[in-house]
Image: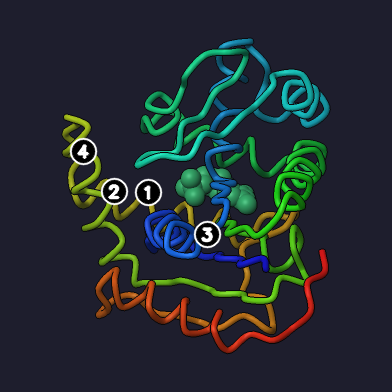
């Protein structure tokens, strides 16, 4: 079974996807971490965020691996970059990087081959529409920009950074706009996805909602 969880930044996708994966004993694939890793690499190697072919080449050659854990471990060229890829400068850079067609084609291929290994939960922006259009369970997780900004503020404070709520909210609104209006695989709800608004739900309630969708699912496995 493949479970696709898409939605905007800060809707709680990775927290929920990881919990669903642990409960079901499935592989969890954080596709946003993969785009972040390439954004990090583009800085390290001085590659322009607009050079799609060069970014795709980086993705092909960097031996990108994800290791499951409380925070997904992200390794490139043998280096642990799990913390660095969450810094605000990478969050900013990953927008233009993830809009590059050639890079998306390469990472989608890698994501499909990782998911092929067995039962998996993937979260991102294009999982239900592009990466796994035949996923048995598709969820579009969303929340208002204000609620998402409050959640992001807590994460950012834990990292010891001092961005204000207003700055975070403005960045979220801008990122939503960019993610949903870009030419390549814009963020959109798949026609057969179930929309779950997390504004008034606890994490446990969201997880239960997804588990209940899984238990009702009888579609054959295809990717
Ligand atoms: O979910 P996140 O914030 O870690 O994602 C980082 C960036 O990568 C975000 O700007 C959207 C982009 N992304 C994407 O374009 N496609 C995906 N499948 C996952 C993330």
The quarter of the picture where the N terminus appears is bottom right
Distance, label 4 to label 1, CA atoms, is 11 Å
Query: Which of the two discs, 4 and 2, labels the residue nearer the N terminus?
Result: 4
Query: Which of the two discs, 4 and 1, labels the residue nearer the N terminus?
Result: 4
Give left or right: position of 150 versus 29: left
- Classify mark 2: residues with Cα within 10 Å, few (<14), some (14-19) or many (20+): many
At a point 31% along the width and 78% down the height, the residue shown is 205
Query: Which of the two discs, 3 and 2, labels the residue nearer the N terminus?
Result: 2
**Res 222 quadrant in image:** bottom right
**SS category of the residue bearing label 1:** helix
Ligand 1 is within 8 Å of the C-beta of the residue at disc 3: no
Q: Which residue is mark 2?
A: 168
**SS category of the residue bearing label 4:** loop
Q: Residue furthest front?
A: 25
Q: Which residue is mark 1?
A: 171
Q: Which residue is mark 3?
A: 177
**Whole-percent x, y for residue 16 in the image:** 40, 62
**Whole-percent x, y for residue 53 in the image:** 83, 27
Ligand 1 is within 8 Å of the C-beta of the residue at disc 1: no
Camera-nearest residue between 155 and 116: 116
**Res 64 quadrant in image:** top right
Q: Which residue is mark 4?
A: 163
Camera-nearest residue between 137 and 149: 137
**SS category of the residue bearing label 3:** helix
CB contact under 8 Å: marks 2 and 1: yes
- Classify mark 1: residues with Cα within 10 Å, few (<14), some (14-19) or many (20+): some
Distance, label 1 to label 3, CA atoms, is 10 Å
């Amino acid at each position: 079974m493949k479970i696709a969880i898409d939605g905007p930044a800060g809707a709680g996708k990775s927290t929920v996807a990881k919990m669903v994966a642990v409960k079901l004993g499935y592989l969890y694939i954080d596709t946003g971490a993969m785009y972040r890793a390439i954004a990090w690499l583009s800085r390290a190697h001085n590659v322009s965020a607009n050079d799609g072919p060069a970014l795709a080449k980086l993705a092909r050659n960097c031996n990108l691996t994800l290791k499951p854990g409380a925070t997904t471990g992200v390794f490139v060229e043998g280096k642990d970059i799990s913390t660095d890829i969450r810094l605000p400068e990478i969050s900013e850079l990953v927008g233009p990087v993830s809009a590059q067609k050639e890079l998306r084609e390469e990472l989608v291929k890698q994501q499909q081959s990782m998911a092929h290994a067995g039962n998996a939960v993937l979260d991102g922006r294009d999982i239900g529409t592009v990466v796994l259009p035949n996923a048995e369970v598709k969820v579009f997780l969303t929340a208002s920009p204000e609620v998402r900004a409050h959640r992001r503020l807590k994460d950012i404070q834990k990292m010891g950074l001092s961005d204000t709520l207003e700055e975070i909210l403005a960045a979220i609104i801008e990122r939503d706009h960019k993610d949903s209006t870009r030419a390549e695989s814009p963020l959109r709800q798949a026609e057969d996805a179930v929309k779950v608004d997390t504004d008034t739900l606890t994490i446990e309630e969201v997880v239960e909602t997804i588990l209940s969708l899984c238990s009702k699912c009888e579609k054959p496995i295809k990717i």
